[in-house]
């Protein structure tokens, strides 16, 4: 019997991906963080590895709605830089 692969939906483009191919954002202790390993406690939402999806999710407020938070433009810019670094590191490390 084959083992099923967990699937998660990107809140930016609404496309489903295997869980290992998608980045989890989590609100833990009132702070929004990127959960690179997918094991942090807290409410989570997923984005595929695309800055276009990040921008779309922020413009349409899908990420903040899914997580039940609000972000200032400064927080969004800082998070975008951190996300860009995360997806670049993932591409380099394979």
Image (cartoon, rainbow, N blue to C red):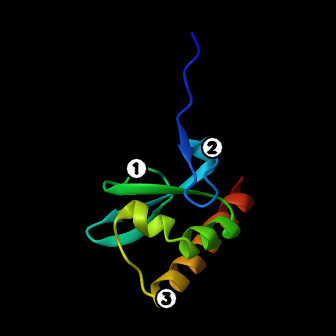
Q: Give SS at disc 1.
A: loop
| Dot in front, 1 or 2 | 2
Q: Give SS at disc 3.
A: helix
**CB atoms of marks 3 and 2 within 8 Å:** no
Residue under pointer 3: 73
Query: For residue 39, which numbered disc appears in the image?
Result: 1
Q: Give SS at disc 2.
A: strand
**CB atoms of marks 1 and 2 within 8 Å:** no
| Nearer the observer, 37 or 19 | 19
Q: CA distance from mark 3 to mark 1?
A: 27 Å
Residue under pointer 2: 17
| Nearer the observer, 92 or 60 | 60
Residue located farthest toward the left when viewing the structure as drawn: 29
Position of the N terminus by quadrant:
top right
Q: Residue at x 63, y 43 (%)?
A: 17
The vertical placement of 65 against 15, above or below, is below
Q: Is residue 78 left or right of residue 87?
A: left
Determine the image quadrant of residue 81.
bottom right
């Amino acid at each position: 019997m084959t083992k099923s692969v967990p699937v998660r939906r990107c809140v930016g483009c609404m496309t489903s991906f295997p869980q290992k191919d998608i980045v989890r954002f989590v609100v833990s202790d009132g702070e929004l963080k990127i959960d690179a390993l997918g094991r942090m406690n807290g409410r989570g939402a997923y984005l595929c590895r695309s800055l276009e999806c990040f921008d779309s999710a922020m413009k349409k407020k899908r990420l903040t709605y899914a997580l039940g938070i609000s972000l200032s433009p400064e927080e969004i810019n800082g998070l975008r830089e951190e996300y860009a670094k995360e997806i670049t590191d993932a591409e380099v490390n394979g």
